[in-house]
Amino acid sequence: MKKILTLLGAVATLAGCNSIGGESSTESSSAPMSSETMISSELAAESSAVVASESIMSNAEEAITSSNATNELTSDMEISLVPQKMELDQNLTLENDSVLQEIETRMKQAEELGIENDVAIHFTGMYLGEEGSMQAIFIIVNRMDVAMTNINITVSFSTIDGATILEEAPFYLTEESFGVLEPDTAMPMYLKIQPENEEAFFSTSNMEELIYKIDEFDFEER
């Protein structure tokens, strides 16, 4: 079943990026799916409201911290969006799913995508679902020369004034549901936000006031 797409503002470019082990404002994060934070096939299959928060243009150089400042951001390489395996299993593609189409639109408008020789994440400024059951939409971009699967990742996500959205939240992107993250591709990630932290998530429409951090990252090479 197609996901329903609703826009609350102008189409956004992707907000910032965050490499493995890095931290910056307006950055997305990929995470392993746990029982509490995983994207279930039921959520992907059911009709959901998708809301796009107001978009922000963020400076990529400001989005890189000292830990990854030596990584070069590039915008001249074509990065393809690949749906998750469970989306493909449900016949959701770039040709028929409005959520995937909107993600791809924002990717095309971004000045930079990913970090050379690294894995990076971007926040799309969108989320799935309604209050009490929502998932923030990110993409994970692989600019390394290896394919990755069964990705374990721990993510922290907060506002600049310290309000917690995710705190070292574990996610597991399994090959059975997520698939394989090939080199020079991007895949969507739907990160579950616990109801008690949704107020912090909705407390700002300014993506520059959100901070994302990948605490841990591990994967199997495919």
Image (tube, rainbow, N blue to C red):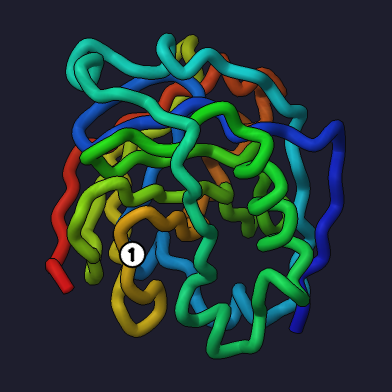
Say left or right for 87 vs 7.
left
Q: Nearer the viewer, residue 55 or 222?
A: 222
Which quadrant, please, contains the C terminus?
bottom left
Q: Nearer the viewer, residue 77 or 219?
A: 77
Q: Which residue is rendered at x = 58% and y = 54% of the image?
A: 135
The location of residue 13, given as percent across then percent down, is 66, 32
The location of residue 27, given as percent across then percent down, is 45, 30
Q: Nearer the viewer, residue 61 or 72?
A: 72
- Residue 165 appears in the rendering: no
The location of residue 123, given as percent across then percent down, is 53, 38
With respect to residue 142, does 44 lie above or below?
below
Say left or right for 6 vs 177.
right
Q: Which residue is rendered at x = 33% and y = 64% of the image?
A: 181
Q: Which residue is rendered at x = 28% and y = 36% of the image?
A: 116
- Residue 183 appears in the rendering: yes
- The residue identified by callout 1 is 181
